[in-house]
Image: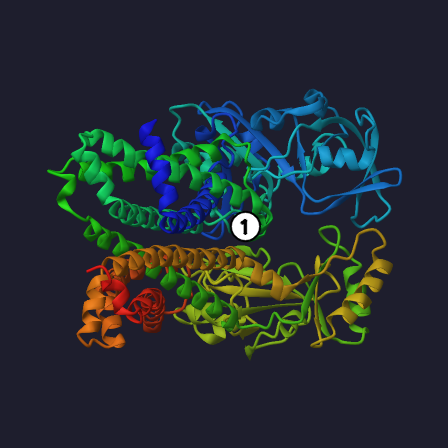
């Protein structure tokens, strides 16, 4: 207890250094807690699923195109009795939204799932009330707690009938379903999102059975394998398993498709799959955040050690007296350890309080995520970080206490490497933040090859709707509308993959089905027009055209005179090119521009699901109001919910924007932590050299000379820390930029600006203390000499 009392007395004595130390420690611990908790939250995704490490889903693609998260519905029958599979489930999702009605109460269902009892058991979904077995009965439904509360209030919903309004071609069509259960909890840390689970038997059974025999990606299939099963071997069998069920179905041969097993552990970290159930995150971004968190923690740790050395050095006389009076080295070490433990306890408590107070701000910074203070993992992180600081500081004390003598003098020289590492971390964070900002500016200013500005995308209900052409004609009459086009696909929305097989050569390409006005509405430059056909034409991009010209003459490309087989038979493939458009970025800048084709078809015979509306600058509100009125007349059921194309494209880089914001704030915090440590350290150094400064001034030294003398000792190490940070920062920058097919360059000015910022901050921090010491009356320093 005596050691504890001495530690408390010492902390109260050195209020300035203790306060500065606690500020840095509290802020860094709070930030580290937030980052580690956020990263841990994402790495915990789907771990509640039984046999997590043995669960896979089937993803498919055609001709080396982009993988789809959905696959063939025929797998539901094809996988029966396979020895590698312990259990599996097939379920379905619909892109369309529903209105669920109970009298005058309406709930918008955005994420419906069609499943059965196997689906519930596979994912371990529990019910708050009801019986999962009833999902095997036709026209039954399970509601989320939120949906049940909105529809029925405090009334028990079990056995009640609800009307499901599916806004397809028949706008008045409602379907009755019976509520058989309420789901116990939301799947917060699961990629599987749903707000209603419908039985796949009944109203939708015919549709689902129809796609069983089609080569379409209409189902989601998840498997749980036995312990020793090889997923690669099973994947290799997929096409042969499917052959009896869809081998003769319309479409490309099964050999053109690739289906494979994706581990459940990778699902949340694989963004970019077509028709994925939920948006994933890039693991590289989480890794960067984790590195930032670790670096901030190290900054705080080094800062703590520097301040701890400073505090102990001010108390060196007391340690001398304790040893002279017979205190053992162990007791002296325990005294220092108690002081560290008290500081860490106070800092950790304050850090948790800060996180609680700033919970709303943190939730906004991390787009809706908030820390769960009831999670044991959070408190383990608090304890682990605190214990790490105590352990490192305690070991550092132990090494010095058990030297030959405690009287050996000051240990401040050991603070130099700590300051060095601190400012190296600060320099690296600043440099990376500048690069992030430069890359995002590059993305914002990059010429995409088309103009997404002032384009609204209106989605119609149902997969194909004959009324969309009526909507287009009416919208074109509205003031402020420059052009309009219908499309099945458009840049920023999922595209389709095909393969053009010409003899021995394959030309995989992506395509979009559009009407003749789409290319003009998107403002894509047409390089050449070879022929005009109002009913059907193919426009390919420049990359595709150049690739074809390497093997075929222009006249053959235009006429579609390609060899149909390796023996150059006269059989021709029906792929004639009507024109060439400029290359444009139909995907994000993560992907290279490859082969692309517009299948342009007459709107008379094709009823697409999207209407693209180009409007005049500054008239968005007026045009949207006009479209809303027109839309409500033609489609009286669904709500008008336009999407602005430029915003949709920007949303592809939301994670980068968030990463920039987080890194920027945390770089500022790292600077502040390092500055507080440097300020306190320089204050103590100046205090130690007070008499020396007084003597120099008495002997005629100028204020500027004194400032330079005091400054150069610390600032040279700041310069060294910046030089040390450059190679590591360069490596990290290049590694991150590799994920982009199109990216900015790592410019010299990033490091010049970083060096300037670091040196300026350090110089201002140190110079303030140096200036105060230099202008002090030397008589005060030498009064008692």
Q: What element does badge 1 sit on?
A: loop
Q: Write the residue at 16% across / 47% down.
A: 409
Expressed as whole percent of the image width and height from the top left, the position of residue 451 reads: 59, 73
In the image shown, does 688 or 415 lie closer to the viewer? Answer: 688
For residue 6, say whether it is visible.
yes
In the image shown, does 677 or 95 lie closer to the viewer? Answer: 677
Expressed as whole percent of the image width and height from the top left, the position of residue 100 reads: 79, 40
Q: Quadrant of residue 457?
A: bottom right
Left or right: 407, with 739 as reference point: left
Left or right: 106, with 253 as reference point: right
Q: Quadrant of residue 387?
A: top left
- Is residue 118 shown above or below 41? above
Left or right: 270, with 429 as reference point: right
For residue 720, say whether it is visible.
no
Expressed as whole percent of the image width and height from the top left, the position of residue 391 reads: 30, 35
Q: Write the residue at 75% across / 52% down.
A: 461
Q: Quadrant of residue 465?
A: bottom right
- Is residue 656 shown above or below 27? below
């Amino acid at each position: 207890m005596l050691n504890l009392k001495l530690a408390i007395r010492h902390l109260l004595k050195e209020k300035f250094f203790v306060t500065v130390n606690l500020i840095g420690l509290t802020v860094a611990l709070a930030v580290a807690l937030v980052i580690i908790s956020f990263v841990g939250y994402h790495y915990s995704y789907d771990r509640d699923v039984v046999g997590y490490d043995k669960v896979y889903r089937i993803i498919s693609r055609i001709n080396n195109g982009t993988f789809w998260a959905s696959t063939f519905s025929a797998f539901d029958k094809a996988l029966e009795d396979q020895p590698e599979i312990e259990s599996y489930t097939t379920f379905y999702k619909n892109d369309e939204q529903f209105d669920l009605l109970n009298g005058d109460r309406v709930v918008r269902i955005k994420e419906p799932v069609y499943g059965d009892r196997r689906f519930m058991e596979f994912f371990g979904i529990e019910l708050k009330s009801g019986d999962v077995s009833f999902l095997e009965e036709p026209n039954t439904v399970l509601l989320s707690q939120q949906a049940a509360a909105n529809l029925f209030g405090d009334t028990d919903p079990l056995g009640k009938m609800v009307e499901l309004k599916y806004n397809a071609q028949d706008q008045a069509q409602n379907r009755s379903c019976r509520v058989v259960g309420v789901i116990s909890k939301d799947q917060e840390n699961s990629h599987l999102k749903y707000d209603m689970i419908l039985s796949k038997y009944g109203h939708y059974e015919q549709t689902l059975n129809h796609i069983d025999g089609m080569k379409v990606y209409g189902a989601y299939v998840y498997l749980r394998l036995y312990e020793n099963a090889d997923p690669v071997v099973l994947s290799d069998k997929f096409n042969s398993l499917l052959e009896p069920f869809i081998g003769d179905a319309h479409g490309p041969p099964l050999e053109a498709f690739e289906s494979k097993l994706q581990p459940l552990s990778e699902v949340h970290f694989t963004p970019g799959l077509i028709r994925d159930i939920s948006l994933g995150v890039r693991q590289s971004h989480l890794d960067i955040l984790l590195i930032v968190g670790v670096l901030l923690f190290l900054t705080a740790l080094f800062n703590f050690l520097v301040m701890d050395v400073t505090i102990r050095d001010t108390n060196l006389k007391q340690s001398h007296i304790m040893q002279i009076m017979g205190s053992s080295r162990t007791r002296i070490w325990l005294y220092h350890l108690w002081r560290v433990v008290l500081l860490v306890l106070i800092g950790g408590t304050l850090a948790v309080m800060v996180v609680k107070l700033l919970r709303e701000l943190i939730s906004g910074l991390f787009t809706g995520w908030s820390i769960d203070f009831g999670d044991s993992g959070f408190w383990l992180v608090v304890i682990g970080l605190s214990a790490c600081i105590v352990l490192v500081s305690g070991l550092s004390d132990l090494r010095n206490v058990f030297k030959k003598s405690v009287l050996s003098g000051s240990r401040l020289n050991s603070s130099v490497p700590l300051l060095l590492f601190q400012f190296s971390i600060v320099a690296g964070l600043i440099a990376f933040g500048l690069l992030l900002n430069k890359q995002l500016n590059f993305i914002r200013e990059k010429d995409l090859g088309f103009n997404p500005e002032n384009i609204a995308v209106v989605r119609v209900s149902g997969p194909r709707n004959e009324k969309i052409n009526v909507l287009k004609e009416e919208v074109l009459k509205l003031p402020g509308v420059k052009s309009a086009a219908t499309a099945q696909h458009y840049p920023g929305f999922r595209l389709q993959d095909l393969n053009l097989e010409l003899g021995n050569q394959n030309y995989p390409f992506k395509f979009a089905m559009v009407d003749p006005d789409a290319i003009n509405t998107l403002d894509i430059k047409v390089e050449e027009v070879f022929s005009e056909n109002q009913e059907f034409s193919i426009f390919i991009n420049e990359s595709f055209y150049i690739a074809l010209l390497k093997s075929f003459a222009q006249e053959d490309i235009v006429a579609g005179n390609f060899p149909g087989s390796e023996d150059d038979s006269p059989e021709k493939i029906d792929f004639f090119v009507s024109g060439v458009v400029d290359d444009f970025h139909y995907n994000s800048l993560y992907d290279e521009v490859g082969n692309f084709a517009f299948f342009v078809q007459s709107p008379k015979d094709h009823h697409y699901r999207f209407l693209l509306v180009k409007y005049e600058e500054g008239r968005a509100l007026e045009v949207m109001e006009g479209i809303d009125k027109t839309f409500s007349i033609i489609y009286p059921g669904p709500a008008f919910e336009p999407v602005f194309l430029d915003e949709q494209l920007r949303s592809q880089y939301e994670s980068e924007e968030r990463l920039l914001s987080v890194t920027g704030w945390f770089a500022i915090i790292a600077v502040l932590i390092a500055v507080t440590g440097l300020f306190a350290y320089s204050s103590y150094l100046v205090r130690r050299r007070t008499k020396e400064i007084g003597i120099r001034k008495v002997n005629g030294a100028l204020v500027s000379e004194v400032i330079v003398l005091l400054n150069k000792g610390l600032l040279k190490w700041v310069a060294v820390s910046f030089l040390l940070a450059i190679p590591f920062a360069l490596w990290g920058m290049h590694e991150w930029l590799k994920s982009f097919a199109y990216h900015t360059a790592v410019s010299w000015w990033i490091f010049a600006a970083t060096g300037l910022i670091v040196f300026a901050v350090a110089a201002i921090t140190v110079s303030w203390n140096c200036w105060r010491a230099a202008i002090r009356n030397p008589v005060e320093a030498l009064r008692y000499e």
